[in-house]
Image (tube, grey):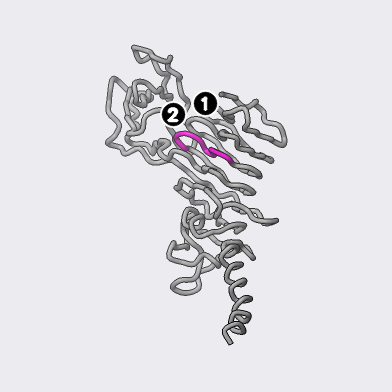
Amino acid sequence: MIAQIHQLLKPLVALVLVAVVFGDERCTASEFYVDNRIGSDTFDGVSSEVAGLRFGPMKTIGRALQKARQGDTIIIANRGIPYYEQLSINGRNNSGFGQAQFTIVGNGAIVSGARLVPPTAWKAVARDLWRFAPHRKGHFQLILEDKPVPEMVAARGAKVLPKIPAGQWAAWRGAIYYQAARLDSPSERAFAFAEGDVGLTFAEVHDVVVIGLTFRHFRLDGISAHSRCRNIVLNDVRSIGNGRAGLFVGETSRVEALKCTLTGNRLHNVLVRGRYSALHTEPKLSEPPTFID
């Protein structure tokens, strides 16, 4: 009798072992929707329209990335309102599997790292010269009407602040100095500064596609493929007006940029670090990437 029971249990034990070994593998991919006008991060994200207390799009892309798994697709609504977020595509859950790629469809939406300068943060230094000191130092960017304000680059280690033309700014000794036109106070205008560090960070992911998103006005990089990333495709992506680089590729990462706009960034439009990192662009960039060790 005991021997018969053992024989009956063998298939069940094998099934349990299969479930343990392969339980994390995805059989199907899902779609999640994000809408920063009508969405809520308490919604399930499986529909683009609100349909009850729990059903509808999520409000933030970050929440969708937390909920998504291998091979899923995140679809972002473009309501003309920027998404003020810093995104991270990280690890196995945000990678592809099999023939399914982990995909983000942006529909032309903007992800912004800008924050308004509080009017009281401006301090008068001299006639029409104003000073603002962000709490994070380096790679500053000053923005007005969604465009970077022209910068006058001060010499590294300058002991005296050089004369700044009207309507421009300079970074000196950990602060932003803005030369206003006569009787023009920056505290009365909607200046913004690059407050978020990086718009989109890839780390240890593979088989990811990002389509139709804009990343702008981040303190460091619009997009950063930081470490051990492969089969990353950027399609019709824009990264503009960032404080260091539009796109950073480093630490053995591999990135393909198709029909992308990487321009108007403060120091580098494309920065590649490490001899084993690789970047392919189509069409070719108007400016060659900057390579560093």
The tally of labels here is 2
Q: Secondary structure at mark 2?
A: loop
Return the x and y of residue 293 as percentages of the image width and height: 56, 24
Q: Which residue is mark 2?
A: 139
Q: CA distance from mark 1 to mark 2?
A: 9 Å
Residue 29 in the image, given as x and y percentages of width and height:
62, 63
> In the image, what residue type sits under mark 1?
Leu
Is residue 258 left or right of 172 when viewed as pictured?
A: right
The amino acid on which the numbered mark 2 sits, given as a three-letter code, is His
Residue at which label 1 appears: 267
- Predominant SS along the magenta part: strand
Q: Residue at x 47, y 34 (%)?
A: 220
Residue 211 shows in this picture:
no
Instruction: Confirm or deny contact between disc 1 and disc 2 (CB under 8 A).
Output: yes
Residue segment shown in magenta: 218-228
Spot the residue most to the right.
Answer: 283
Foreground of the two, 23 or 262: 23
Magenta-drawn stretch contains 95: no
Answer above or below: position of 10 versus 103: below
Residue 281: percent from the left, percent from the top? 69, 35
Q: Secondary structure at mark 1?
A: loop
- Left or right, 227 with respect to 196, comes to right
The quadrant of the image that shows the N terminus is: bottom right
Residue plotted at (45% across, 41% down): 113
